[in-house]
Amino acid sequence: MKIQNVDLMYLKKKYGTPLYIYDEKHIKDNMDGFLKYFHSSKFKTEILYASKAFSVKEIYRIAKEKGMNLDCVSLGELYTAKSVDFDFSKIYFHGNNKSYEEIEYAVKNGIGIIVVDNLMELELLDSICAKLNKTQEIIIRVNVGVSAHTHKFIVTAHVDSKFGVLYGSDDYKKMIEICNNSKFVKFKGFHSHIGSQIFDLEAFRAALVKLITYAKDYKEKLILNIGGGFGVHYTNEDSPIPFNKVSEILIKTCEEELAKENIEIEKLAIEPGRSIVAEAGYTLYTIGFTKKTPNKEYYFIDGGMTDNIRPALYQAKYDCDIVGKENEPRNHKVTIAGKCCESGDLIIEDYNLPEAKTGDLLITYTTGAYGYSMSSNYNKALTPAVVFVEDGKDKLVSRRQTLDELIEREI
Ligand code: LLP
């Protein structure tokens, strides 16, 4: 089996397993797709790659090369972007509890926009900007009361979210007052992010309509950022909407609503993370022992929840294959279990696969988002290597952690 014409046995020999493999062409095509279709003649548009989905130097380099801007949520992500000279004016900085150090770092380095999450953050930001004598553009994260999870979305005032403020609330009014009176912070618009792995475009439409309603109260042309959350294909239960369609609907909705309300905006921004990297990513494992119990058959792999926490955390579903046996009869119902000391360390449950032997390679699909970025050293597992493949070539992007690195910070 090959990805981008690179043989998986060859990758196993060269880099070992578990191994994160990314089809670089697929990532670039996804970025190109959003960049091509997300346009309007009525307002500017901006596409920010939500780098929490997968944050390594190389993805920041690719985003930079493609002309895609960034969404960062921590000093760590900002620092990684900085390490490849990413233009900070093209970054939005998110987070509900940004530290003094993070805000100072962002402002000093000329961050484009700070997405302010709450009143205390704005007070701190204003004081830091005053100290540095720097002005800073901000947008406020508002809680639009639309919350979407996969196929369903709910419109309720989800008043207790840890993210954002309620439009028109006392905190919100104080925030606007601070902006009006400050020489340093400049209010530029609104942000909302309604959830993840969403297939229902109506949910985005509802959120966008809310933001436009809020924007009506301001005479300046604002930036509206509606976050990410566009669903991808993990298994056949998922039917994602292609990015040209997502773009078309969002742009059309925005144009129509603006015309209806008779207002203009400066810019509409989106922050896709998963939909850029998920389907471009694969994880390659080696099968070790196999075992039958009265009711189950197990294939044990050399990774697990340390490289992919999503099944344990969200009951996320994946598809997989035994490399080289893709066309053999799938006559074994098996559970793919990781090697961690945790009964919940199951990557895929009750899945039909051919008979596997020790040493066979198992590949899981659509692992490019929130796999590596949520990996851990539980049981002192080593973080796997990350390799990009394109057009018959492989490129090491992050090497496997070593045992010495695992303990080097320990006193
Ligand atoms: N913008 C904001 C403000 C966000 O909070 C997120 C994701 C995104 C953009 C990107 O969303 P995406 O397009 O990737 O769905 N660990 C979870 C996902 C957490 C998402 C958090 N926020 C998972 O593995 O499913």
Image: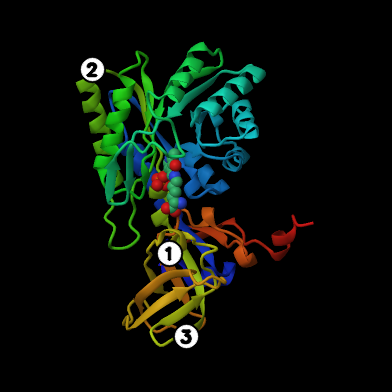
Which residue type does callout 3 highlight?
A: Lys
- Tell me residue 135's x, y (percent): 56, 18
Residue 184 relative to residue 259: left or right: right
- Tell me residue 256's x, y (percent): 21, 27
Closest to the observer: 371 or 172? 172
State the SS at label 2.
Answer: loop
Please name which of the two marks, 3 or 1, marks the residue nearer to the observer.
3
Closest to the observer: 32 or 301? 301
The residue carrying mark 1 is: 5
Q: Quadrant of residue 104?
A: top right
Which residue type does callout 2 highlight?
A: Asn
Count numbered badges in the picture: 3
Residue 370 relative to residue 230: left or right: right
Q: Alpha-carbon distance for marks 3 and 1?
A: 33 Å
- Sequence-wise, the earlier of marks 3 and 1 is 1
State the SS at label 1.
Answer: loop
The residue carrying mark 2 is: 262
The residue carrying mark 3 is: 291
Closest to the observer: 341 or 50? 341
Residue 36 relative to residue 258: left or right: right
- Mark 3 CB within 8 Å of ligand 1: no
Q: Tell me which residue sits at (47%, 85%) in the image.
A: 291
Please name which of the two marks, 2 or 1, marks the residue nearer to the observer.
2
Image quadrant for the N terminus? Answer: bottom left
355 shown above or below 118? below
Q: Tell me which residue sits at (20%, 22%) in the image.
A: 260
